[in-house]
Amino acid sequence: MGTTTFAAPTVTEEMNSPGPELLGQVARLNDLDETLVEQMRAEALAAPTRGKAAYGEYQSGGWWTASLMNHSPDGDPHDVVIGDGQPRPTTLLDRMPATARFLAGLGLDFMYVRLARLEPHSYLWEHRDYAELTERGRHRLHVPLVTNPSAVLVTAGARVHMAAGALWRLTPSQAHGVRNVTGPDRLHLIADVYTDDAYRELAHQPHLYTQDAVRLPTMTAVDRSRLMKRASELAGLGFVTSAEQVLLRAYYTYALPEGTAYDLIAELHADRGADAEAARWERAKNHLLAH
């Protein structure tokens, strides 16, 4: 284990029976020293770049990433392709000494590290990550630096607010999505790491507090009918993208079976006789949710 100092845990009521599926997908690992978080926040906000808009098929727009550790031979922070291997610090991390010390102090085997920004009124649609990376165990760590109550992760039928001041773990190989409705920007330090003894020590006591997660309601037949009617009306007026996004956003309102939002969009287009569009969304579902 490295030398990072963690804060004493906050005395807060643990979430009653979060369930193994939710806790296996997202959890707090440790509280972080408040001064350390403030230093890293200041460095991230002073970064000379917002990063690069990438993975457009996963998002509504407003998602930016800048690499802190990657495989670029010249340390380019705008090289945001995630891949296996031993990453090197980028020129951006060279300007962030507190963040560099925090990462080094974790003592982990890093795969990739970045700053990720999600603007207000923006969504990362339901998807899985790591589908093409299967040979090694890996995990995703989040340090929320700037956030707000409307910035939430949705997974396993629950809406989870990843609060600042803690180190979180996400299992991105399971279906999940992110939204930021009201702003300000959601700004996270995200590190993809390999499974090893240091990681197991860090993550030995995953937990959630009562304020962290809200269970989403099941969509009823009435809810579904109302939603499809609204989307159909928008499409009929020519606002096809808006109609699709109405259905995509259902993932953040209801506890839907995996891929349901994409199925609803394909149904919308099939009902309109737009078979090519229906097939396109079926392919998108298979791509975004690939195992």
Image (cartoon, grey):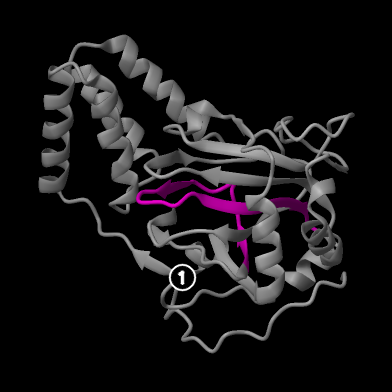
Quarter of the figure with residue 158: bottom left
Within 10 Å of disc 1 (Cα), the crowding (few <14, some 14-19, many 20+) is few
Relative to 220, does residue 38 appear above or below in the rendering? below
- Is 78 positioned to the left or the right of 283 in the image? right
Q: Nearer the viewer, residue 128 or 41?
A: 41
The image shows residue 266 at horizontal and vertical percentages of 30, 24
Residue 174 located within the stretch drawn in magenta: yes
Relative to 159, does residue 77 appear above or below in the rendering? above
Q: Nearer the viewer, residue 178 or 225?
A: 178
**Which range is magenta?**
167-195
Quarter of the figure with residue 26: bottom right
Question: In the rendered image, which residue does mark 1 sit on?
Answer: 19
Quadrant occupied by the N terminus: bottom right
Residue 45 located within the stretch drawn in magenta: no
Q: Which residue is drawn at 72% across and 35% down?
A: 82
Q: Three-letter amino acid code at disc 1?
A: Gly
Relative to 18, does residue 185 appear above or below in the rendering? above
Looking at the rendered structure, the secondary structure element under dot 1 is loop
Quadrant occupied by the C terminus: top right
Q: Which residue is drawn at 42% across and 33% down?
A: 60
Residue 127 appears in the rendering: yes
| Magenta-colored segment: predominant secondary structure | strand
- Is 169 positioned to the left or the right of 276 in the image? right
Residue 155 appears in the rendering: no
The image shows residue 191 at horizontal and vertical percentages of 71, 52
Q: Which residue is drawn at 41% across and 75% down?
A: 211
The image shows residue 271 at horizontal and vertical percentages of 17, 19
Quarter of the figure with residue 236: top left
Q: Which of 230 and 288 is in front in this view?
A: 230
